[in-house]
Each structure stands twice: as C-alpha cells, then as structure tokens.
Amino acid sequence: FTTHKVPLGELLPLDRLVKAGRAALQCATFHGIIYRTEFYRDTNVQLSEKIFFEDQEYATLPFKDVTTVLPLDLFLYEYLIGNAEQSVADTSQVRRISHIEQVLWSIADCRKKNPAMPDANQQYFMHKLAEVLLSYYVVALVKNPDKRAGRSDVRRLRRALAAAGHDDLVRQTKGKYWLALAMNRLNISNRTLEFFKRSALYKTLYNAVRKT
C-alpha cells in the first residue's frame, strides 16, 4: 500500500494519520509498522502466542500509548502468497476462525481497559477493530463452505460484543455485516468475491456501506 495523504519523512501527531483516513490507515499493518524498541517495551504489550493473526495485535495494542508517527517512504517487508497453510489462505482462515475472534477480543478488551486514551487513539482502535471484525464476517459468511454455521457464528459474536459493551463496534460494522450476509445467502464463494471486488459495482456498494 502507498498513501499520498500524509507527508513522508515528517513527524506527525497521531490524529493527522487518523484524519487522513483509509488511504493512510491501510498502511498501518504488521508489514507497515516499526516501533522504537524502548517505546514498545514500555507499553508492556504481550502478544497472544501459538495463534495466527496476532499481527493485528502488534499493529494495534501499542497504539494505546502512541502520540506521534513518522511516515517513511520505505518497503520494509515482503509477503509471499502461495502457501496453503499460511494465515491468509482461505482454508487456513476458516480452520482458524477462532484465532481471529481471540485477537478481536484482545484488542477490544485493551480498548475497554484504557478509556482515557485520546480521541485519535480511540479512533485508531475502532478502525482496527472494524477491520478485524470485517475479516471475521468474510471468513465466516463467505469463505466458510458451511453457510449456516457461518451465520450462526457471526450472530453469536455480534451478540457477545454488544453484551460486553462494544455495541458501538457492532453498529459501526452493520452495513458490512449485511453485505457479507447477502453474499452468504446468495452462496457467493470467495473466488467470486475476489472477481467482484475488481468491479465498479462492488466499489459503489462498499463505499455505500463503509460508514454504516
């Protein structure tokens, strides 16, 4: 990913990155973030072990203490796709969907335990939570060949999040949920989804539900 909405090589307050929107935040991933070692140690963040998708914790949990970011014009990490056992493979994601849920709860609990975070940090956490929850929707409702089980899993998780005080997250992802649910009901496969995502119609629909 590249972004053109933030100046490169300039130290910025976190709210500048957040206000830049998705074009900037999509760079805030495991392969797009490095931390100063002293800062990272001081956050006392403990990543989950022996699970996949813990990179979402790495890219989120330390941001409870982040005040400034330094965007750099660098490619720090190359990710090779092709191994059926890697975390981004469809079959692997379906088999390990509980790992996505575990990471989601880890980030949600961290946010809940740090209510005094500044607005920019809260917004960053909400963005990352919404991204992880959307991943869960797609894996459960589209990638899982057992469509009924996927619907049941998503309903259970949304109820549990609301009951735990994360109803704002449930509301924020409502549009994406209904879109993924429609794909589930229409029995759309992930291969079809990937083809559809390249169309103008998908972009129109996605933009329409992004804010719902």
Image: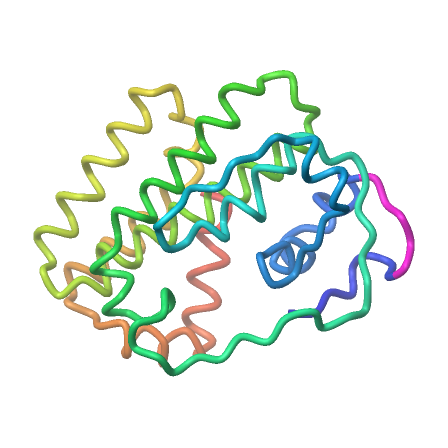
Q: Which of 157 and 77 is in front in this view?
A: 77
Q: In which quarter of the image is the N terminus?
A: bottom right
Query: 120 left or right of 92?
Result: right
Split into 4 quadrants, where in the image is the C terminus?
top left
Provide residue 71's location: percent of width, then percent of height.
80, 57
Residue 160: which quarter of the image?
top left
Judge whether 148 appears above or below 115 on screen. Answer: below
Give the extent of the magenta segment: 9-13
> What residue is rendered at 59% in x and 56% in y?
29
In the rendered view, would you say 196 is above or below 174?
below
Residue lying at 15% horizontally and 59% vertically, measured from the top left: 185
Residue 49 belongs to magenta span = no
Q: Residue 8: horizontal and vertical position, in percent?
A: 86, 61
For the point 51% across and 19% down, the residue is 113
x and y percentages locating residue 157 in the rendered image: 25, 36
Q: In terms of secondary structure, what is the magenta stretch mainly?
A: loop
In the rendered image, residue 54, in percent from the top left (x then y), is placed at: 45, 49
Q: Which color scheme did the rendering employ for the protein?
A: rainbow
x 55%, y 43%: residue = 127
Number of numbered labels in the structure image:
0
Whether 183 is drawn above or below 125: the answer is below
The front one of 74 and 25 is: 74
111 lies left or right of 205:
right
